[in-house]
Image: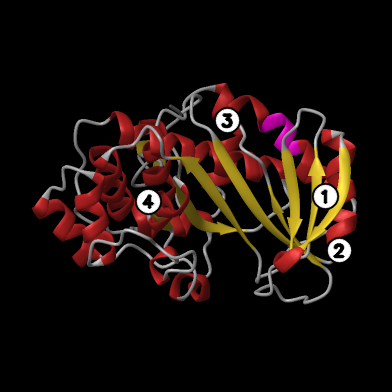
Amino acid sequence: MRDFRFGIEIETVGQTREVVARAIQTVVGGEVRFVGAGYDTWEVRASDGRAWKAMRDMSLSDPFRHAEVVSPILTYGDLDLLQNVVRAVRAAGATVDASCGIHIHVDAVRFGAKGLVNLAKLVHQQEDLIVTALGTQQQRLRTFTRKLDSTLVQRIASERPQTLEDLNRLWYGRHNRRPAHYDSSRYHGLNLHSVWFRGTIEFRWFEATLHAGKVKAYVQFVLALAAKALNAKAAAARKRKVTRESSKYDFRVLLLRLGMIGDEFKSARQHLLANLEGSAAWKNGRPLTASASGGPVEADL
């Protein structure tokens, strides 16, 4: 997971694109310039040569004071830098509301058909639990962040595509040699349209936040998910049912299976488990033992 390149888009409201761009500059250095064009873009050319952008997105609730923060290509070692950018944007007066989301792109260059098939199966199996953990709004799930269609995943599983061209045909329902930017298939929590349009795998489940720790947790989660799919020999496609009472335990087990173990991911686990019910340590609740008086008490394990 530490070897993937990635990018992130964070939608914000409450502040102008110029102010947001200048806030980013306080972290990354370099120069700010107004690019304009269709997205009314302000660009920050950082000291390291990479370009950060504050762009217009008319799907957001405030038509005048908003900015979609678009990062350049980042690496795992840039997570601290990203967190500092998020903190600076928040300190400049930007905020988020229900219209805002976060999209994370992972470089797809290392993925052939097998890795993408594994990823589609893994996401389909766990997607109900994932969106429950992330608190994804139902409105978002109906529109811009739809779940993978079970029929599509079943076709992928049965036809076993061997090449990206085979998978392209299954994803679009035809062989789509020149995917359009706004193809309707892009509006899924796992967006494989982006593989053929820009060479990335896009993850769209996330409600926007300017909490730097949560942003880092989201990035770590998708990188771990991508790494699991890339390295797995195979993946099961059967959809998993979410049990509310054990959802915290079940998602913690998923995170551990993705390799998010130890102190490095302690904060990420806390953020990703925060919305779930039950015990992270016990699937069916903390077990009871008999007390000296014969009554049940919680076991101290």
The three-letter code of the residue at mark 1 reads Val
Residue 95 or residue 29, whichever sits in front: 29
In percent of the image, x 40 and y 43: which residue is there?
249
* Residue pointed to by mark 1: 89
The three-letter code of the residue at mark 2 reads Gln
* Residue pointed to by mark 3: 266
- Report how far apart the C-alphas of labels 1 and 3 lie in the structure: 25 Å
Residue 275 or residue 245, whichever sits in front: 275
Q: Residue 236: image x %, image y %? A: 19, 45
Q: Residue 142: image x %, image y %? A: 44, 75
- Report how far apart the C-alphas of labels 2 and 4 lie in the structure: 40 Å
Mark number, residue 15: 2
* Residue pointed to by mark 4: 246
For mark 1, give the secondary structure. helix
For mark 2, give the secondary structure. loop
- Report how far apart the C-alphas of labels 1 and 4 lie in the structure: 36 Å
